[in-house]
Image (spheres, rainbow, N blue to C red):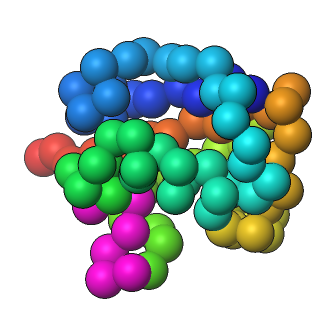
Amino acid sequence: MKIEYFALLRDITHKKEEEWHEPAATLDDLLQALIQRYGPEFSRWVFRDGEFGRLAIIMVNGQDVRGLRGLDTKLSASDTVVLFPPVGGG
């Protein structure tokens, strides 16, 4: 599957995007594997106090996972997952 990173997640991963070839049946599986690869700083932008949702938006094939099954959203090798961190401004 393809994973795209935006804003500070690009700084953490040192990538704009990557092809993911590891097993990941659900979004939770994928996020846990990404946390293992990219460490606690990545985790802080994905989970808060062990709860999903610190990222502003996670999309799978153009659909916000909050309208799908959240962390239980099923994934396949042909999917595109997009990770947007929170955006602040003023």
- Whether residue 67 is situated above or below residue 56 in the rendered picture: below
Relative horizontal placement of residue 85, taking residue 32 as reference (left or right) = left
- Whether residue 57 is situated above or below residue 11 in the rendered picture: below
Name the outermost residue toward the left: 90
Whole-percent x, y for residue 12 in the image: 25, 33
Total number of numbered labels?
Answer: 0
Identity of the residue drawn at 23% across and 26% down = 11
Identity of the residue drawn at 53% across and 49% down = 33
Identity of the residue drawn at 69% across and 68% down = 70
Q: Which sits in the foreground, 25 or 57? A: 25
- Whether residue 81 is situated above or below residue 64 in the rendered picture: above
Q: Dividing the picture into quarters, in which one does residue 15 lie?
A: top left
Identity of the residue drawn at 63% across and 63% down = 28
Say if residue 64 shows up in the picture: no
- In the rendered image, the quadrant that contains the N terminus is top right
Whole-percent x, y for residue 10 in the image: 32, 26
Relative horizontal placement of residue 78, taking residue 41 as reference (left or right) = right
- Decide whether residue 27 is among the magenta residues: no
Whole-percent x, y for residue 48 in the image: 32, 75
Relative horizontal placement of residue 25, taking residue 11 as reference (left or right) = right
User: Magenta part of the protein: which range?
Assistant: 44-50
Say if residue 68 shows up in the picture: yes
Q: Which sits in the foreground, 61 or 37? A: 37
Whole-percent x, y for residue 7 in the image: 30, 30
Q: Which sits in the foreground, 51 or 87? A: 51
